[in-house]
Image (tube, rainbow, N blue to C red):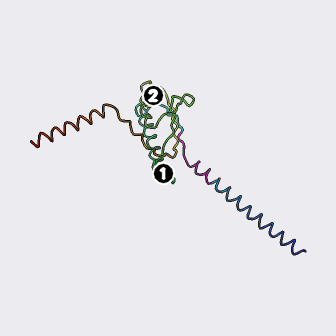
Amino acid sequence: MHYIQNHNLIQNKELARISCIIHIETFNSVVLQMHQISQRQIMKKTFALTHPKIKTDRLIEAARADIKKYLKRERSKELPEGVDFWDFDCKFGPTITESKKIHVAEIGLHIDSIEEQALEAFYIEILAKPGHRTKKPTPLPTPESFTSTLYRKQSTSLNNDGASS
């Protein structure tokens, strides 16, 4: 009887050990996922466009260079499996509270508008995220395309008839 109790105790300890290993593995996978998310760096920066010794144009050029450097660094990172490219979520505005979502391609235009408005600073936030390519929809044929196709067919058949005689 004592042997059976010890055997059951050993089995229970073994089950507890296996259960503990499973919990540790799930915890490690959660920690790994959190680590992967935290590896994505977010650029949150307010660029001051006033300085006692540096001209505004140079400050704007420095801000553009800093943004381009961040985008280049993020795009050069290895893509996860099943991802086509790095996409970016961007916010831009004169201040953090006034920032609005924009597309990456519009960053330069918004910096130009800030320069024209002669503001003292601007805020930008850029977050890299995995992107997936989507197929562009094919445009529906228009009536003009049918008539131009018919006209081309008629003109080529007339040219061929004229060439054979």
- Residue at point 52% right, 45% down? 129
Quadrant in which the N terminus is drawn: bottom right
- Residue at point 23% right, 38% down? 153
* Magenta-highlighted residues: 32-43
Amino acid carrying mark 1 in the image: Lys
The percent coordinates of residue 56 (x first, y second) are 42, 30
The percent coordinates of residue 29 (x first, y second) are 64, 56
Q: Are marks 1 and 2 in contact (CB under 8 Å)?
A: no
Q: Is residue 147 left or right of residue 71?
A: left
Amino acid carrying mark 2 in the image: Ile
Quadrant in which residue 106 is drawn: top left
Numbered disc in front, either 1 or 2: 1
The percent coordinates of residue 82 (x first, y second) are 50, 52
- Assign a secondary structure to mark 2: helix
Give the Cα distance between marks 1 and 2.
Answer: 30 Å
The residue identified by callout 2 is 114
> In terms of depth relative to the viewer, which is nearer, 122 or 142?
142
Farthest residue to the right: give it. Answer: 1
The residue identified by callout 1 is 77
- Assign a secondary structure to mark 1: loop
- Residue at point 18% right, 40% down? 157
- Residue at point 87% right, 75% down? 3
